[in-house]
Image (cartoon, grey):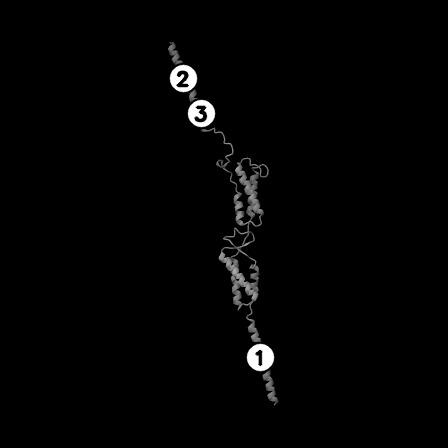
Amino acid sequence: MRRYLSIFIVCALLLALASLGISALAEESNEGPVVDYTLLQELYDANKDKTPVVSVNGRDVQNCDYWIPTEEGKKMFEDLLAAVEALLKNEDAESQEDADELTLALIETSKGIGKGMVDKNRLTLSLDDAIAYMDDRIAGPYGVFSNAPTAFQQKCIAAVAVAERVLTNLRATQAQVDAAIASLYFPYPSNDEKDHDQEAPHQTGEPLILFVLASIIFVLAMIGLICATLIRYNKMSF
């Protein structure tokens, strides 16, 4: 009798242990696969605040803004961020491969996003050169050029004023900076480009020469006429 009781107790214990094991396996299967979201979370945090604008080359983008070449690329980036956000919020990836796939997609897409970096170093140098160029030809700041027409003065002064505004504008684009640099080159105007308001110089060229020649011919003709008259008078006297 005791023998049967011992066997019964052992069987009961084995059944209890098997039941516990089955329950643990069931709970583990219900929890789903273990997925590491660490890298995906870091990438999402680095890109979630980027709102890129569409730009062909980024030269019309304000400083420190983000840009992307096409509308399709922008939409793809926005859709991908939304998908990553939903996955991280619910943590419902079916496998590590699913999370890794989104991670790689976000890495590749973010490579196509540029950051607006406006370079104003050349503008600073060009502005200094332009002001020095003007100082050589004007009396006082923004005064009157000593040897330049009025329109040329106004062009130089306006270009320097615009360049100074662009230089101090924190939201200036690279295209605006490049345009300001180009406007600071001041080729000195030719005579044809000078103001029509300036008094035309007296013409002392060909007309004056013709007048002198005509005068000489007239004097010689008069001398010849006088000589002929005198000769005729002398013949008549004899």
In the image: residue 126, left or right of residue 212: right
Q: Quadrant of the C terminus?
A: top left
Percent coordinates x, y for residue 99 in the rendering: 53, 65
Kindly report the distance in space between the C-alpha atoms of the residues bearing marks 2 and 3.
21 Å
Q: Residue 209, image x and y in percent?
A: 45, 26
Above or below, 107 against 225 in this view is below
For label 1, the residue is 19
Residue at position x 56%, y 61% from top? 44
**Which residue has dot 3 on it?**
211
Are circles 1 and 3 on residues that touch, CB within 8 Å?
no
Return the disc, 2 or 3, that comes first in the chain's sequence.
3
The residue under the point 52% across, 43% down is: 183
User: Which residue is label 2 attached to?
Assistant: 225
Q: CA distance from mark 1 to mark 3?
A: 133 Å
Q: Is residue 91 above or below residue 157?
A: below
Q: Is residue 211 left or right of residue 67?
A: left
Callout 3 crowding tier (Cα within 10 Å): few <14, some 14–19, many ≥20 = few
Front of the two marks 1 and 2 = 1
How many labels, in total? Answer: 3
Q: Quick one: label 1 or label 3, which is nearer the N terminus?
A: 1
**Which class describes the residues within 10 Å of circle 1: few (<14), some (14-19), or many (20+)?**
few
Circle 2: is it few (<14), some (14-19), or many (20+) Cα within 10 Å?
A: few
Tag 3: amino acid: Phe
Q: Nearer the viewer, mark 1 or mark 3?
A: 1
Q: What kind of element bears circle 3? A: helix
